[in-house]
């Protein structure tokens, strides 16, 4: 009987280790960082339920990736895309506002510009009503495409058709 209990304890320990490993993998792939066609720019699409823990994970990964890429590759712009986020994915709007404010300040201190795209009208209203102090200082665009156009114009870049 005691041996069976020990075996069950060991099995539980192994299952907990596997769960932790899978959670880390899910967290890693749930915050994709996509290189942009515009040099020194990355896109980070935000999807899924935005709990405080998840926001912490997302914005920590953005900050760490921005630091690494700005140091190694001259990254100067991060576009954070909220297109897939509706009111039902939002947790506490004040918490989202705080994380938006913190990631903008952190990246700006590293010399990296932040553009936010894809806020829906409902999310926009919630952010304004939350009293987020930085709302007027956010660089926001309706779509990823609009943000890219802005960056291209700002950097004097144009597309050319290849024949």
Image (cartoon, helix red, strand yellow):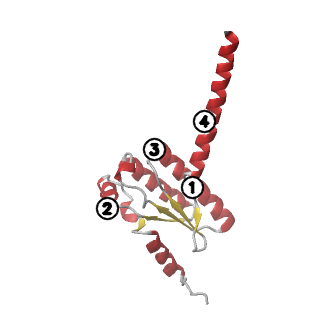
Image x and y of residue 98, in percent: 42, 50
Closer to the N terminus: mark 3 or mark 4?
4
Q: CA distance from mark 3 to mark 1?
A: 16 Å
Compare marks 3 and 1 and give the one earlier in the sequence. Answer: 3
Q: Residues within 10 Å of mark 2 (few under 14, many from 20)?
A: few
Position of the N terminus by quadrant: top right
Q: Nearer the viewer, residue 25 or 94?
A: 25
Q: Secondary structure at mark 4?
A: helix
Total marks placed: 4
Marks 3 and 4: CB-CB under 8 Å?
A: no
Label 3 sits on residue:
52
Q: Are marks 3 and 2 in contact (CB under 8 Å)?
A: no
Splitting the image into 4 quarters, where does residue 122 fall? bottom left
**SS of the residue under disc 1:** helix
Q: Residue at x 69, y 19 (%)?
A: 7
Dot 2: what SS? helix
Tell me which residue sits at (64%, 62%) in the image. 69
From the viewer's perspective, is 150 left or right of 157? left
Chain-order first, disc 2 or disc 1: 1
The residue beneath circle 1 is 63
N-terminal-most mark, 4 or 2: 4
Q: What residue does disc 4 label?
A: 19
**Residues at discs 4 and 2 in contact (Cβ within 8 Å):** no
| Element assignment for label 3 | helix
Give yes or no for contact between labels 1 and 4 (Cβ–Cβ under 8 Å): no
Considering only vertical position in the picture, is 17 above or below 109? above
Dot in front, 4 or 2: 4
């Amino acid at each position: 009987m005691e041996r069976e209990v020990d075996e069950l304890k060991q099995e539980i320990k192994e299952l907990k280790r596997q769960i932790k490993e899978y959670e880390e993998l899910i967290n890693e792939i749930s915050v994709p960082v996509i290189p942009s066609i515009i040099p020194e720019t990355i896109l980070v699409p935000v999807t899924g339920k935005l709990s405080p823990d998840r926001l912490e994970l997302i914005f920590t990964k953005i900050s760490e990736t921005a630091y690494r890429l700005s140091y190694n590759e001259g990254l100067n712009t991060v576009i954070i895309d909220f297109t897939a986020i509706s009111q039902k994915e939002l947790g506490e709007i004040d918490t989202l506002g705080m994380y938006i404010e913190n990631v903008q300040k952190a990246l700006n201190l590293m010399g990296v510009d932040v553009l936010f795209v894809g806020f829906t009208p409902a999310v926009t209203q919630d952010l304004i009503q939350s009293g987020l102090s930085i709302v007027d200082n956010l660089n926001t665009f309706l779509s990823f495409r609009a943000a890219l156009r802005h960056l291209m114009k700002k950097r004097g870049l144009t597309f050319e058709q290849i024949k």
